[in-house]
Image: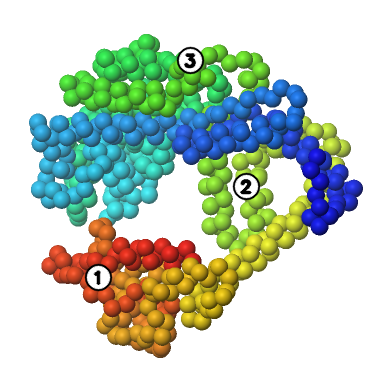
Amino acid sequence: MRLQSPTSMNFLRPSQLLMQNQMKILLNVHYKKLSFTMSDRASNEKLANKLLVEWRSEALKSDNNEIDDVLSFHCMAHVLLGFHRYICTDMKTMEKELEKKQGPIGRDALPMFKMWSKRETVVERVAKTTSDIFGPVGDHLGLRDAWEAHCAANGIRSVIGNYKDNRFNGLFQTAAEILYHRQEFIKVLHLVPNNNKKIQAVKADLQSKCVEEMLGALCILYIQITGPYWWLVTEGSVPYLCLGPIIKKLENVLKVSEENPEKLLDITDKNMKWFDSENVEIPHEEKFVQVINTIEPTEFLNDTLKTMAAAMKRTIQKQLQDFLVGQFSEEPSEYDLKRTKFAHNTNLGCEHHFGDLDSSQRRRPNASFHHHTSVQLLKRNREHLFEWLEQLKEDEQCNLMKTARSGGKAMRKRHREDEKKVSVNIYSHAFKKQNKKSQRVTSVDDDDSDDFSTMNQIDKELPDVNDTFVENEYLVVAYQDSWYPGVVDKVMSENKAVVNFMLPCKKAGTFQWPNSKDIQQVEKQFVLKKGLIPECINSGRQWFFREYQDINRLYEMYKLEYF
């Protein structure tokens, strides 16, 4: 055993040694109990899981008992985002081929929209823009009010939601909602007196036959595939380890749909039911099924369904490979089911907690860390907590409450101390950065520590701190997010001036003047370069700085040192 020298050895009291041993034993117990991880399918998170397993093995290498493997679970809800992305990629190719044969689709056929963006697919654009003006948060020239009045006068119950409410199933569900109200939407759009271009674009899209059939295809897939899938992964009746047979059935249904897309139109076909459950709940299912029953099969609809089914099959085969031929494809053991019985099928709980924390901090921005922590612990667990509390005996409940009161005071005191430490660290960090910035305007000896070597290198390329501001001179100023060029509008003092800044364009090194002046007061130590003369391009609308690459390099050095 290697011995520490007396000068470096840490002498601990017996009580401290006992506490350290107890903590080590407790941590080892938790390491052994670690049964699974739940994350996204991003490569960096997979690498993090791998590092966690290696670290756990290293921590428990002295344990002679057999150690269970840590199972890597991945969020099943994110597969819906894969459906969305793969479908849009394939649909974009299909739309280009269709435009060559029949011309532009929807609003793109009108000359006024010739220059509008066409990066996203037509059906994705329709889902977003239609829900924007008709959805619950829509406030576009009073169109939402007109829609609600139309529904009240005609006894219609609106089902249109916000596209961003459910980012996982948003494309499919919103398409079904739009298809259900499509004719009524067109009626309301005809009655709107002030039609701007966005309203005209939505009207042109909804009146297009191709768009109608694309919406129909997504509506069918929502009822047959994505609606039941969302219920399956969020309801939690099927354990994660038991999803293998269901995923295989889903893959087979998608294979059949790719070969015979017309089978998806028959909602009653039991061979197309990949998930056998009478309890599946899909929002507004009856209304959407009624719409599907009125859809007439066409060649374009079948081609669209075939393209979408192939894209979804590819998603399953790529993202859910573990359930097809991998570690989760076989029937799980009773032991693995028992040690993962509390596992969810998604990591949405974590996302909900972050959302709750953001909401709590917006509502009470001045509340303490102790308050926000208490809110988060209780917000989504209070029902289960009180159910567990009611199961305890009366004397156990009393003892627990007494312990909680005394322990709560100690915890609050500790939280206050932690908040003070954070405040001190923030202040110290800010003061340190301020001192670094001030080094530019103070002399530094060559014999100082190595921390100033980088600053000296930067100072050689920066303007002389003794130079004064000159009105109407171009210069470049460093900010925390980037560098910006501008013109000195007014010299306020030897170290301060008012600068009229330019805005960056998409092309590197190109800038333009904003519609309204962006005027800021600038101190001399933040100036990166002076005496620039930009080139005028695009008939005076834009200006190009040939030195932008040198400025980028200088800014990165300056940012690392001073920001």
- The crowd level at tag 2 (other Cα within 10 Å; few <14, some 14-19, many 20+) is some
Residue drawn at x 30%, y 31% is: 87
SS state under label 2 = helix
SS state under label 1 = loop
The part of the image, by quadrant, that contains residue 216 is top left
The part of the image, by quadrant, that contains residue 470 is bottom left
Of labels 1 and 2, the one closer to you: 1
Disc 1: which residue? 513
286 with respect to 449 (left or right): left
Give the x, y percent position of residue 481.
41, 63
Between the C-alphas of marks 1 and 2, the distance is 46 Å
Q: Earlier in the sequence, mark 1 or mark 2?
A: 2
Residue drawn at x 77%, y 40% is: 24
Give the x, y percent position of residue 43.
46, 36
Of labels 3 and 2, the one closer to you: 3
Q: Does residue 440 lie above or below 23 as drawn? A: below
